[in-house]
Image: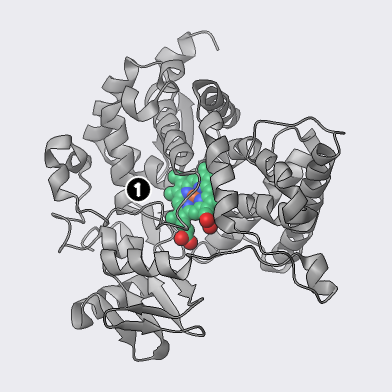
Amino acid sequence: MSDAAVKEGASVQTLRRLRTEHGPVFWDRTRPDMLTVLDPQVTQKLEAMNFADLTMLDDVADVIRGRKSAPFDWHRLRAAWQGQMRHLMDAEGLRRLAHDMRRIVEADVGRPLDLLWLAERVSIDPLVTPIIAGLGPRARRIVVAEVLSKVAWVLGDVDHDRIVTVVHKPKMIALQLLAGLVVRRELKGRATGRRPRQRDLADPVVDLMPTLGLGRAVDAVTSLLTAITGSPGAAAGCLLFELQRQHDWRARMEAELAGVSLEALCEGPTRQAPVTARFVKEVLRIWSSPPVVTRNVRTELSLDEVKLCPGQQYTISAYMLHHDDRDWHDPERFDPDRWLSERRGQCPHGSYVPFGWAPKNCVGANLGMAQLMILAHLFCTRFRIEPSDPDRASMAVASLVRPKDFAGVVHVREAAAAEAP
Ligand code: HEM
């Protein structure tokens, strides 16, 4: 990686070196039970085979009683979420999301900010309602605080001053317990008719409770909250970072979005603003999180020369696939126009996986994409960033890919300030 503003961690640097020495699929000499797979087609097939029969873990209550829970197919739960996503993604749902995002930025206007942390809050807080709506203010605060405490923990791998170690972990565990209780109370209330049903991702879980049981229903909803701790906020931080340094692209997007109101954008974000959509796709290509994932082998896997059995592991990496010059033309270059329809042939099939691989790919991909479009709209029309030390800011590729030392002040643009609030 030739970009001086990018700091790739040791694991990615090692993968780059080993990829050159050994090719796309290799056993790690230092870890004999670990196969590294950096070939798009092999990754796709291994993931499909490894998770074909994925069921939910047993209910903790059953584990304590020493008995097995009735098997529950994970794909059934995913299908229920995907059905509900269609409602959350309608124009009304996206406008609510946009409103919540704007409110969070507005509250921080004029103050010196850690812009990555702003991006995390702007992504995560508004996503809590689509996951579990109808909570009282205190319960909602607990859930948001729980998710953010996990984010701070993950970001602590590079930004050591982000967490106060001694206090942070017990607090994070306490919040996890409290958030679990909030989710349990809400699901139980809806199942017994004491609380109203909602248009959120928790609601289809209520319908599945007769077979799932309360314990696993809570696990399902908390797994959604865990899923939003990593990639959405990191992607939002990367988007703001690129918006700051890609001056020509920012000008193009400002010109495009000046003609598309936020209301109109929510009718169909990528359709309404194709230039911005290309920018967002490119941000997700060049800065994809998590960069490296390690899987436990769940079942015997046999694919041509590759043979794996339970107890072994394999490593896969969307980041490495997105930066492979065998598949991409000039992969280190930030070039949203590579997504123009006439250049699509240069984007190899199976090599663009910012939302992971089926059948464990992202359930919220479209919502995540829409949220990034809304963020771009907000920062190209209503707000602008004044970075405090642009030369210091860098991109850290560690457990997540996200900007570091990215600080500044958010201002309301003059034209937007003149409009009615
Ligand atoms: C730009 C935003 C987002 C990005 C880049 C992203 C990326 C990803 C990736 C790479 C995975 C696969 C992780 C793995 O294979 O271990 C994943 C899984 C998941 N994501 Fe997202 N995500 C985003 C937004 C969201 C949103 C908004 C939601 C829900 C509200 C969501 C829910 C999930 C869930 C539930 C899974 C786990 C799926 C499963 O295990 O079957 N994501 N996401």
Which residue is at the front of the view, 187 or 373? Answer: 187
* In the displayed structure image, the side of residue 206 where residue 72 appears, left or right: left
Residue 98 spot, x, y in % from top left: 52, 27
Query: Can the viewer see residue 117 in this picture?
Result: no
In the figure, 219 relative to 408: above or below? below
* In the displayed structure image, the side of residue 333 where residue 60 appears, left or right: right
Mark 1 highlights which residue? 284
Q: Residue at x 27, y 78 (%)?
A: 25
Q: Where, quadrant-wise, is the N terminus in this rendering?
A: bottom left
Query: Can the viewer see residue 351 in this picture?
Result: yes
Which residue is at the front of the view, 10 or 321? Answer: 321
Which residue is at the front of the view, 301 or 225? Answer: 301
Q: Where, quadrant-wise, is the C terminus in this rendering?
A: top right
In the figure, 123 relative to 147: above or below? above
Q: Residue at x 33, y 17 (%)?
A: 258
Q: Residue at x 82, y 51 (%)?
A: 181
Q: Residue at x 41, y 77 (%)?
A: 314
- Amino acid under disc 1: Leu
Disc 1 under 8 Å from ligand 1? The reply is: yes
Crowdedness near tag 1: few (<14), some (14–19) or many (≥20) residues, C-alpha within 10 Å: many
* In the displayed structure image, the side of residue 376 where residue 297 appears, left or right: right
* Label 1 SS: helix
Residue 223 spot, x, y in % from top left: 63, 55
Residue 338 spot, x, y in % from top left: 18, 43
Total residue callouts: 1
Residue 200 spot, x, y in % from top left: 64, 35
What colour scheme does the image use? one colour
In the figure, 211 relative to 81: above or below? below
Q: Quadrant of residue 121?
A: top right
